[in-house]
Image (spheres, grey):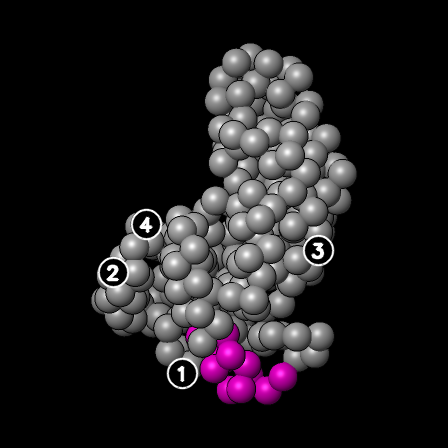
Amino acid sequence: MTVIPFPSKEQGRGRGQSRWLLLPVAPRANTRIRFAAVADRSMPAITPDEAVALVDRVMSEGGTVEAVDIAGPGEPLATPHATIECLSRLHRNYPALDLGIVTNGLGGALLVDGLQESGLKRVTLCVDAITTVTAEKIYAWIRPGARTVPLAQAAVTLVNEQAATASVCARVGLTVKIATTVYPGFNDGEASLTAMTCWVLGELGASVPLHFTACHPDDRLLDR
C-alpha cells in the first residue's frame, strides 16, 4: 500500500481545515507482492507515542482531524499490540475521531473484538486475490505467523482469513471497504468475482463499497 505522510501547513493545509490522516504505525510486513520494489526505508514506522503526538500537534495548530487510518509501512495486524495501543489512546483522547485501519486481514478475525474495544470504526481490507491460484501468482511470500510457510499453504490461509475477517467485522457492525489493486494479466479476471464477494458481504449488513486501484505490475509498490 502507498503511505501518505502527514501533510504540513506548507502543503496547503490552512488552519481549521479538516484532514484525513494516515499513521504509519505498523513496522512489520507479513506479505510481499512479487512485483514490489524494496520497501522505501525513508518512510519508517512511527511509534504509538509519535502517532498520538502528531495528531495532538495538528489539533493544537488549529486543524480539524475528522478521520485517522493506521496504514503501513507494514501490516497493522502483524503487530497488533502497537495498532491497538495507538487506536486506544486516540479514542480516549478524541472520542469522536473516526478511526480505521488498512489491512490484508491476516489474523484479523481473532483480533476484531480488541480492535473494536479500542475505538475502531472502519476496516479497509486489501483483497488482491480471492482464489489461491491467483494469490500464488501475486505474492512472493505470505507469513501468517512468525515464520514463512510454503506459498501454496499460505495462499489458502490468506484467502480464508480475509473472508473471515470481513465477515466478523460486518457482523459486529464495523464499516468494511474492499480495496483491490488490479494487476493486468494476473488478477483482472477476478474483478466480477470480487464484486460478487462484496455483494455477499453487503447482505450481511456491512457497508462495502468496492474500490479498484489500477496498478501495472511494473509500478513501484511498498511491502504490505
Report whether 9 appears left or right of 197: right
What kind of element bears circle 3? helix
Q: State which tag comes first along the sequence, 2 or 3.
A: 3
Residue drawn at point x = 38 percent, y = 57 percent:
170
- Tell me how far mark 1 sits from mark 3, CA to CA: 32 Å
What kind of element bears circle 1? helix
Residue type at numbered disc 1: Val
- Return the residue at label 3: 81
Asked if the residue at tag 3 contacts the one at tag 2, i.e. Cβ–Cβ closer than 8 Å, the answer is no
Q: State which tag comes first along the sequence, 1 or 3.
A: 3
Asked if the residue at tag 1 contacts the one at tag 4, i.e. Cβ–Cβ closer than 8 Å, the answer is no
Residue drawn at point x = 68 percent, y = 25 percent:
56
- Tell me how far mark 3 sits from mark 4, CA to CA: 27 Å
Asked if the residue at tag 4 contacts the one at tag 3, i.e. Cβ–Cβ closer than 8 Å, the answer is no
- Tell me how far mark 4 sits from mark 1, CA to CA: 28 Å
Q: State which tag comes first along the sequence, 4 or 1.
A: 1
Residue type at numbered disc 4: Ser
- Return the residue at label 1: 133
Asked if the residue at tag 3 contacts the one at tag 1, i.e. Cβ–Cβ closer than 8 Å, the answer is no
Within 10 Å of disc 4 (Cα), the crowding (few <14, some 14-19, many 20+) is some
Report whether 197 appears left or right of 100: left
In this picture, is 91 found above or below 169? above
Residue type at numbered disc 3: His
Residue 41's disc number:
none
**Nearer to us: label 1 or label 3:** 3
Residue drawn at point x = 51 percent, y = 62 percent:
104
Magenta span dominant secondary structure: helix
- Tell me how far mark 4 sits from mark 2, CA to CA: 9 Å
Residue 91, horizontal then vertical, whole percent: 60, 36
Would residue 190 be counted in the magenta stretch?
Answer: no
- Return the residue at label 4: 207
Residue 107 visible (yes or no): yes
